[in-house]
Image (cartoon, rainbow, N blue to C red):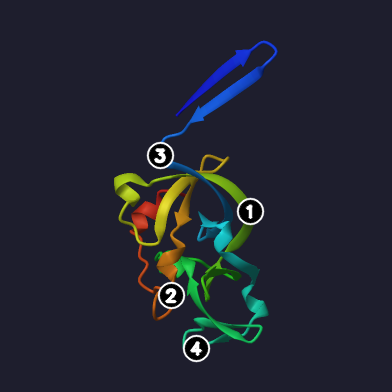
Amino acid sequence: GSVQLKSEAGQGTTITLKLPLTLAIIDGFLIRAAGVHFVVPLDMVYECTELSAHKQTGNAGNFINLRGDVVPCVNLPEAFQMQSEHANDLIVLQQGEQRVGLVVDELLGEYQTVVRKGGRVLGNLPGVSGVTILGTGQIAYILDVGAFFGHKGPARSVQTPVGVVASAQ
């Protein structure tokens, strides 16, 4: 991108920012799963809570009772084939009338971020729509929330090559 400054005495200063179309700024919610950072678009976040506060149901505990509503859950580290020892936080996402919970290690809070396309490496990665660089220099993956919703419930086949995710650590 580029920045242009134009000043006129008595008139003020005009600052023009030109950003490439591959960039977007979103309000997000930063989470961590198995040591990897992810960002969820904030407008998709319905609620954040501790998983232990809600009764898990189903054969594998893949549903929770959220104040009387049964909500399907996806363990984010497992969905991306990563090892996690303490995934106990829950971020509930809403798309239309559907809700799905993502079980994560840590809820880190709101985070305004510049989103970049992942290029050839991340372009075909299910469940990831882009990347951002955190203030620490670490990579955070922007989750494609739509991948966790489907006609029959959340996607269970979100798979990421372990080498790609591991390289962000």
Crowding at mark 1 (Cα within 10 Å: few <14, some 14-19, many 20+): some
Q: Tag 3's secondary structure?
A: loop
Q: Nearer the viewer, residue 8 or 99?
A: 8
Crowding at mark 3 (Cα within 10 Å: few <14, some 14-19, many 20+): few
Q: Which residue is mark 4?
A: 58
Q: Nearer the viewer, residue 141 or 8?
A: 8
Q: CA distance from mark 2 to mark 4?
A: 14 Å
Of the residues shown, which amino acid type is indicated by label 4? Gly
Crowding at mark 4 (Cα within 10 Å: few <14, some 14-19, many 20+): few
Comes first in the chain, label 2 or label 4: 4
**Residue at the location (67% across, 16% down)?**
11
Comes first in the chain, label 1 or label 2: 1
Of the residues shown, which amino acid type is indicated by label 2? Pro
Q: Which mark is residue 110?
A: 1
Of the residues shown, which amino acid type is indicated by label 1? Glu
Q: Position of residue 6 (x, y in %)?
A: 57, 17
Q: Is residue 22 left or right of residue 112?
A: left
Q: Which residue is mark 2?
A: 154
Q: Which mark is residue 21?
A: 3
Comes first in the chain, label 3 or label 2: 3
Question: Mark 1 and 4 residues: CB-CB less than 8 Å, in contact?
Answer: no
**Residue at the location (41% across, 35% down)?**
20
Crowding at mark 2 (Cα within 10 Å: few <14, some 14-19, many 20+): many
Q: Tag 4's secondary structure?
A: loop
Q: Nearer the viewer, residue 112 or 3?
A: 3
Q: CA distance from mark 3 to mark 2?
A: 30 Å
